[in-house]
Image: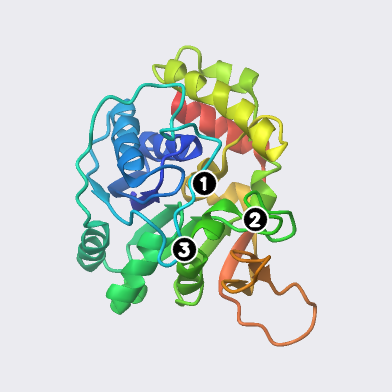
Amino acid sequence: MKSKVIIDTDPGKDDALAILMLARSQNIDILAVTTVAGNSSIENTTNNARYVLDLASHHAPIYSGASKPLIKNLILGNVHGNNGLSGVTVTKTEPLTNDAVIKTFKILEKFPKQVTIVAIAPLTNVANLISQYPNSTKLIKELIIMGGAIKVAGNKSPVAEFNFFLDPDAAKIVFNSGIKITLVPLDICNQTAIFLPEFKKLRNSSLYEPIINMMKPYIKAIKKFEGQNGALVYDALAAGFLIQSDIYTTIPMDVRIETKGELTNGMSVADQRTWGEKNINVQVVNNLNRDKFLNIFLKLLK
């Protein structure tokens, strides 16, 4: 039986890889793609979502959502180029529907406790869903979230990961919601880069040219802005968890999101003490088999 999925995204090159993986997986039924501002403007992320779905020859509907965070000013990403997908030419203009929240709720009503939301962007849309439709928390099967930094430095501030830094208020609402959450944090993403020679194994795929054209400038930007070698494929790891969770391990944790700290805004604060009462609200991915993930990644995109 196929897993029913809504992808909440701000494409973004790692988002593009995640969408392609899910679109190519025979075990995934993408019911909708919802877009949010983050890696680029809402106009760009929505156009980019159409570009990526077209690459995959997939016809999931696209519903645009939040154009800015709940409270903070919008800060765009810097590793994906001006339009979010530098290296390729996005020609189609996808209309902004501004109805991601209501469309998501309607899908959840139609398929109660059957839909996983793969949230690979700032959590503004998901927080708006919870705020506007409180009953949605009982309808979502699971949230798979790419975000946060548990034991490692942040990639947007010394302590905060990009998605949570952009909209910490939204992340706080989501983490306090009681929804079942699996978190794919920077800790594991930093250990699972994919390198250019590995992308070149896609050479006979119809996706090879657009992927390689996106990854070359992305790898350079990751090196410049984050000091890491290779393509950090953050969101693809969240997609991979849904596709084959048994190559991952998780640990239960109490994780809260800081929204008021002068230096710690957006920090994912994990209670790592070995004593004291905890309110476990998330399963945190703490390991995965990189070789098996890479095999799945290459097999799907070939």
- The residue shown at (39%, 68%) is 127
Task: Please say if the residues under marks 3 and 1 sit with CB atoms less than 8 Å apart.
Answer: no
Determine whether the residue tagged by mark 1 lies in a helix, strand or loop: loop
Q: Toward the viewer: 174 or 203?
A: 174
Q: CA distance from mark 1 to mark 2?
A: 11 Å
Would residue 207 appear left or right of 112 to someone viewing this image? Answer: right
- The residue shown at (31%, 34%) is 53
Mark 1 sits on what residue?
244
Seen from this angle, which residue lies furthest right?
Answer: 274
The percent position of residue 195, horizontal first and vertical second, equals 65, 25
Q: CA distance from mark 3 to mark 2?
A: 34 Å
Q: Quadrant of the C terminus?
A: top left
Q: CA distance from mark 3 to mark 1?
A: 35 Å
Residue 287 appears in view: no
Looking at numbered disc 1 in the image, what kind of residue is underneath it?
Gln
Q: Toward the viewer: 172 or 20?
A: 172
Mark before the other along the chain sequence, 3 or 2: 3
Looking at numbered disc 3 in the image, what kind of residue is underneath it?
Lys
Mark 3 sits on what residue?
72
Residue 196 appears in view: yes
Seen from this angle, which residue lies furthest top?
Answer: 204
Residue 148, located in which quarter of the rendered image?
bottom right
Mark before the other along the chain sequence, 3 or 1: 3
Looking at numbered disc 2 in the image, what kind of residue is underneath it?
Thr
Tell me the crowding category of disc 2: few under 14, some 14 to 19, or many 20 or more residues within 10 angstroms, Cα based. Answer: some
Which numbered disc, 3 or 2, marks the residue closer to the eye? 3
- The residue shown at (36%, 74%) is 137
Residue 117, located in which quarter of the rendered image?
bottom left
Would residue 295 appear left or right of 51 to someone viewing this image? Answer: right
Q: Toward the viewer: 240 or 133?
A: 133
Residue 108, located in which quarter of the rendered image?
bottom left
Mark 2 sits on what residue?
249
